[in-house]
Amino acid sequence: MSETIVIRSAALEVTSLPVTAITRESRGLLTRMFADPHLLEPGERKSLVAELRGAVKAYPQVATLRVLLGMALCVDLDVHQAIEELRTAVQLEPASYIAQLKAGELWMRLRVMPKAEEHTRQARLLARNPAQAELARRQAAKLREMMQHGMQRGGYRGPSAMLGRLRRLFTPKVAIAREGPAQVS
């Protein structure tokens, strides 16, 4: 039987990991990151991300390691890589409460509400205890509040949408130029 490491944050069970995946020092950094992400110094964040990248390379099919890496990348402000890691974690384990919750949180922070709502809804459905259900409920409430205040991005619509916006931007100038100089009577 293989040994496992259990990482916990306040009222939230994260999961079990292979014992060789993360060093004791990185477990301490993860604990501090869960307590308050602002406590980690830039060097500590880089060290944690590097170690988690190595763990993901060693155990590519462990979704929880990808979630932890995604969270560390968010703390280190590497959003694009965080999106990819969390997306992969959700693909590897769609029934993972923490993967869905953290993916929803990241999309919420990026103001992409449809994706945030979907992942948060999935997390609410997957909650296994009252603490998990409460975290997902609070995230869903925050999403609704943000949407009521109009805090969302339009989302990606493709290159044709950009052309349409440019056309609208230049239309008044073209219309004025066609009319010619104002006639004085």
Image (cartoon, rainbow, N blue to C red):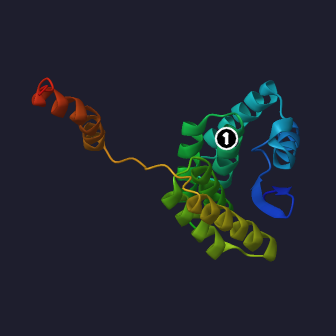
Residue closer to the observer: 151 or 72:
151
- Quadrant of the image occupied by residue 4: bottom right
Residue 119 horizontal side relative to residue 9, left or right: left
Question: Under tag 1, what secondary structure?
Answer: helix
Residue 7 horizontal side relative to residue 96, left or right: right
Tell me the kind of residue under disc 1: Cys
Residue 107 horizontal side relative to residue 163, left or right: right
Residue 171, x across and y down, in percent: 22, 35
Tell me if I can see residue 173 in this picture. yes
- Quadrant of the image occupied by residue 161: top left
Name the residue beneath numbered marker 1. 74
- Quadrant of the image occupied by residue 94: bottom right
Tell me if I can see residue 96 in this picture. no
Residue 135, x across and y down, in percent: 75, 66
In this rendering, is residue 11 above or below 169?
Answer: below
Residue closer to the observer: 169 or 136:
169
Residue 41, x across and y down, in percent: 83, 28
In this rendering, is residue 183 above or below 106?
Answer: above
Residue shown at 55%/50% (left/top)?
111
Residue 136, x across and y down, in percent: 69, 67
Residue shown at 64%/46% (left/top)?
59
Quadrant in the picture for the C terminus: top left
Residue shown at 77%/59% (left/top)?
16
In this rendering, is residue 118 above or below 53?
Answer: below
Q: Residues within 10 Å of mark 1 (few under 14, many from 20)?
A: some
Residue shown at 81%/71% (left/top)?
131
Residue closer to the observer: 166 or 155:
166
Query: How many numbered callouts?
Result: 1
Residue closer to the observer: 164 or 3:
164
Quadrant in the picture for the N terminus: bottom right
Q: Residue furthest front?
A: 185
